[in-house]
Each structure stands twice: as C-alpha cells, then as structure tokens.
Image (tube, rainbow, N blue to C red):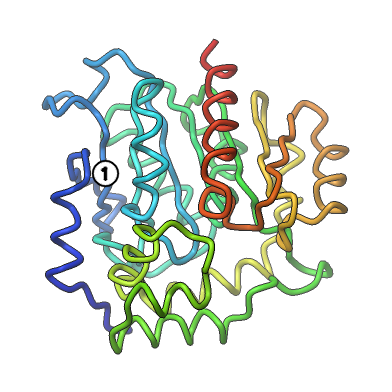
C-alpha cells in the first residue's frame, strides 16, 4: 500500500470549513465526510433540508468541493464524501464502481439520510449513476457532472495515468499554488491552494485502480438504466464529455435532461464557477420543486 501524506497545514484548512467531520463504516473501511448540516447530533434532517450527497472526482478529496457545497446550504444539506483512498478516508482494498457505490450507500444509511439527492463530478458522477441504477437506497434524483465516457472500445481517458502520477509526485515532494496554477491556471486561487495541500492525501494505488476503471468500466452500461429524475451537466469544451458523448447520452437515456456549461472543460465548477454554480442551483431547485 502506497504512503499517503497529509500535512498540519492541510488539516488546519478544516478550521475554515463550515462543516462538521463525520465518520461512517463501510464494512472495514472508515469513511470521512464533511456534513454541512446544522451541527446537531441528528445531522441536518433537523434543519429541514434535503440531503445532497456529493461525490468528488478521482484526485479530489472532499475539502476541494467546499466552494461548491457552501453555495448550496440554503437549498440542501450537502454531505461531501472523502471517497476511499482520498482525504481522511481509509484506502480499503477495492477501487471499482461497485465498491464506491457500496460506500455511498453506507454513508446514506450511516447518517440516516432520508431520500437524498446525489451529485457526482467526474469519477463521482460514475459512482452516482451506479448508486441510482442499483436502487438499494431510495433517492430523490441524481446530478451527474461530466462523467468519464471512456471505456472498452471507446478510447482512452483524456488524462493519462502518467499525468496523474506526475501530479501526485509533485504533491508528495511538496508543491504550492503557483505550481498547481501551471496545470490549472483558470482555477480560483483558493482552489489551487487546497489542491496543493490535499492532493498528497490521495493513495497512488487507488488512483491507478480508478483510472483503470475509466478505461475498462463502460459508463454506457449503466447510464441507460439510471432512473429519472437525473440531470447530466457537462462542460462545453470538455474532452471527457464530447459533443458525440453528450448526443449518445441524450439518446440512450431519454428521461434525462442535459445542461451544457459554456467556457468550461472537464473541471466544470473550477473552470467557470459562476455559471456552473448558478446552473447547479437551478437544477436543484427543479429537483426539489
């Protein structure tokens, strides 16, 4: 098992997050979540807001989605998951979609989330699709943001495993926001800083396994049976959800609605935060309405 690193400066970031750390067991795996509830022992069901389970991407610990979650707390109760092998969650031994889906179901049961919505970005969107299709917990709906559509006979995922490995190596030897900005120049400065401090918390073996899944688990095996209501949000310039991929998604699940974010690539919320968050709020309003 590869070593994971988390510095004191990274842990100190939690002091600035308006969320409570909670822990859930998924079998032997201990999962950490950031709960943007009202701080009571009963979570935020007591606050009267619908839970929104947020599932980040392949190299995104929960804290990196804080800027999204905190913009939604007047609408929902965001519960952002450190997917196994990232952030403060255990690594575990399985890193494929059924493992991640079981973890998500464990979070919902462990926190007694009543008919939550599920929002996933990138890898998290793939997980959300599987959770919805399995129908082992009742959901109000799903929002899938730029799910990887690579897979068998569909070509490789646009970001190579070597690129991810290089980024992890930078983080493990010590990086900063300026270096992160070389790869992600459009990101808000705070998100560059969080990336610099938290990326080393990701297990390289977990990243390798998940990347393998991007190219060997076909999103379109699951997507046609994702039940309504579901919304697929994608970046207009995304190399992950191309125009052809979006067209296939529209025709293979006709109950789904698609929304395109202009001037955004795969990292939709980071590339065009204002428009992406406004669109997300609109979608949530429709699902809650």
Of 104 and 178, nearer the camera is: 178
State which quarter of the image contains the C terminus: top right
Secondary structure of the residue carrying numbered label 1:
strand
Q: Residue at x 69, y 71 (%)?
A: 157
Question: Is 7 rendered above or below residue 101?
Answer: below
Quadrant in which the N terminus is drawn = bottom left
Q: Position of residue 247 (x, y in %)?
A: 87, 45
Q: Which residue is mark 1?
A: 34
Q: Tag count in the figure?
A: 1
Residue 87 at x, y percent in the picture: 29, 62
| Residue 86 falls left or right of residue 11 | right
On screen, residue 40 above or below 152: above
Disc 1: CA contacts within 10 A as few (<14), some (14-19) or many (>=20):
many
Left or right: 96 as drawn, with respect to 116: right
**Which residue occupies 28% across, 58% down?**
29
Query: Which residue is painted at 27% across and 83% down in the image?
Result: 3
Taking the spot 57% from the left edge, 57% from the top edge, the residue there is 267
Percent position of residue 94, x then y: 43, 66
- Residue 262: image quadrant is top right
Q: Position of residue 285 (x, y in %)?
A: 54, 18
60 vs 74, nearest the viewer: 74
Q: Quadrant of residue 233?
A: top right
**On the image, which quarter does residue 80 sit in?**
top left
């Amino acid at each position: 098992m590869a070593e994971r690193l988390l510095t004191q400066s990274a842990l100190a970031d939690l002091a600035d997050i308006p969320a409570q750390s909670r822990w859930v067991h998924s079998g032997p795996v201990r999962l950490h979540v950031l709960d943007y509830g009202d701080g009571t022992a009963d979570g935020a069901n007591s606050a009267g807001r619908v839970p929104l389970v947020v599932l980040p991407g392949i190299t995104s610990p929960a804290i990196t989605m804080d800027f999204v979650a905190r913009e939604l707390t007047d609408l929902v109760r965001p519960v952002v998951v450190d997917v196994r092998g990232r952030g403060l969650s255990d690594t575990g031994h399985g890193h494929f979609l059924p493992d991640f889906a079981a973890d998500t179901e464990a979070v919902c049961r462990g926190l007694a989330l009543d008919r939550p919505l599920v929002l996933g970005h990138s890898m998290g969107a793939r997980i959300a699709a599987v959770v919805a299709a399995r129908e082992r917990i009742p959901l109000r709906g799903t929002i899938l943001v730029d799910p990887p559509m690579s897979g068998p006979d569909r070509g490789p995922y646009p970001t190579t495993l070597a690129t991810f490995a290089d980024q992890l190596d930078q983080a493990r030897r010590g990086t900063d926001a300026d270096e992160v900005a070389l790869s992600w120049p459009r990101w808000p400065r705070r998100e560059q800083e969080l990336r610099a401090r938290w990326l080393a918390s990701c297990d390289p073996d977990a990243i390798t396994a998940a990347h393998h899944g991007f190219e060997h688990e076909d999103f379109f095996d699951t997507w046609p049976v994702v039940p309504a209501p579901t919304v697929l949000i994608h970046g207009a310039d995304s190399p992950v959800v191309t125009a052809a991929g979006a067209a296939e998604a529209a025709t293979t699940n006709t109950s789904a609605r698609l929304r395109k974010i202009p001037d955004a690539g795969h990292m939709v919320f980071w590339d065009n935060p204002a428009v992406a968050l406004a669109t997300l709020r609109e979608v949530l309003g429709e699902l809650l309405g």
